[in-house]
Amino acid sequence: MEQQRQDRIESVRIMVEYNWMYLHHLYQAASTRLGEAGLKAVAAGIRRHGHYRGESIRSSAQGCSQPRDAFALMRAWDTAELGLASQDERLDLRGNGAEATLHLAHVPGSDYFLDKDTEPVLELYWREMLAGLAPGYDENFSITYEPLAGRGTAPWVITLSFSGNGGQVSDIELEDTFLHPVASVLMSRRTAGVFSGLCMHTTKALIERFGGTGEAVARRALYQFGAERATGMREQAKREGKALDFNSWFDIISKRDPNSAAWVFRGDTHISAGVFQVTCTYCPMADMWAEEGSEGLALGYIYDMEVHRGLVEAFNPNGVVAWDKVKTRGDRVCNFRFSIPDLVTDEDPPWARGLGNN
């Protein structure tokens, strides 16, 4: 049972790390090209994202199943970042429904930023996200926390206060999500969906403030996020003496990323040295983008284009990213059609050989 629990924890850990990877590259791109004004737009996008999370938690089945208060918020928390930053991955919540303190072993994300000069974005993220989340959840709710500056991976305490007429419960027991396979998959999917919301809300804020230049900054951040992941994969392939082809790419990404927990793939799969052909039938990120209608899907398409290019091109610069169908253009599935032209053989599908669709 404990080994299964640890496997579930590891399956979502990389998805949580995506938040910090993306924020790192977003901070670099916005501050370099747009300066302080760019960071203010990023802050506005993060606060909007926090408000979305608060509303989402409030509206979830778990959030609606009990009166709102400090403990109810944490019972319905929507992602895995707090659990992974807690001792033994179990939330330590003390107090009552009116005021509770959450004790974390370290600031979520602080381990990622220890060796980076972009650490200020972590404080910006938690400040703006929590400031947006509190009123999104309830107008009688507030969240305060200990300062982050210079804390590294030291313990962190968040205080949750509720002045409304909710349950005011004193029962502090919280379920261990990672003990339950269904709850763990749902947490993994929601963590992926919420991350896609962070990308969407910050991209939208940059475009609203800076137009085409803001979009270019957002695209660079997304591309570099994908490229960081691919660079790690490329280095791993070289250490292990593997070729920089799609056989290696798929083998490594399957072990590094939690696809089996969050996404569903089926149908016309073909993976060879020169071809990566898969169909994704369920994507929690596309679900989130679809909540915002055509605008959300359009912003999601920017993510699809830039992140997938980074994931392929930084692994092998000859890689080509294409698709027949993609959810962010309104299709029911994503038919990914990636290739490395000089590695394509007669055994690969006709489209990869320039002979039309298969």
Image: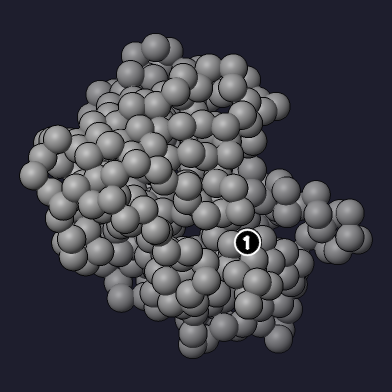
Of the residues shown, which amino acid type is indicated by label 1?
Glu
Q: Which residue is mark 1?
A: 10
Q: Is residue 150 above or below residue 246?
A: above
Q: Is 210 on the left or on the right of 125, as rendered?
A: left
Residue 250 seen in the figure? no
Q: Position of residue 61 (x, y in %)?
A: 21, 66
Quadrant holding the N terminus? bottom right
Q: Position of residue 297 (x, y in %)?
A: 27, 56
Tell which residue pokes out farthest to the top in this image: 36
- Residue in view at x 25 percent, y 64 percent: 62
- Residue in view at x 18 percent, y 61 percent: 66
Q: Is residue 331 above or below residue 23?
A: below
Q: Nearer the viewer, residue 337 or 328?
A: 328
Q: Nearer the viewer, residue 21 or 157?
A: 157
Q: Quadrant of residue 3?
A: bottom right
Secondary-structure class at tag 1: helix
Tell which residue pokes out farthest to the left in this image: 165
Q: Nearer the viewer, residue 316 or 90?
A: 90
Q: Is residue 165 above or below residue 354?
A: above
Q: Position of residue 354 (x, y in %)?
A: 57, 74
Q: Position of residue 5 (x, y in %)?
A: 60, 70
- Residue in view at x 34 percent, y 41 percent: 95
- Residue in view at x 59 percent, y 22 percent: 151
Residue 314 seen in the figure? yes
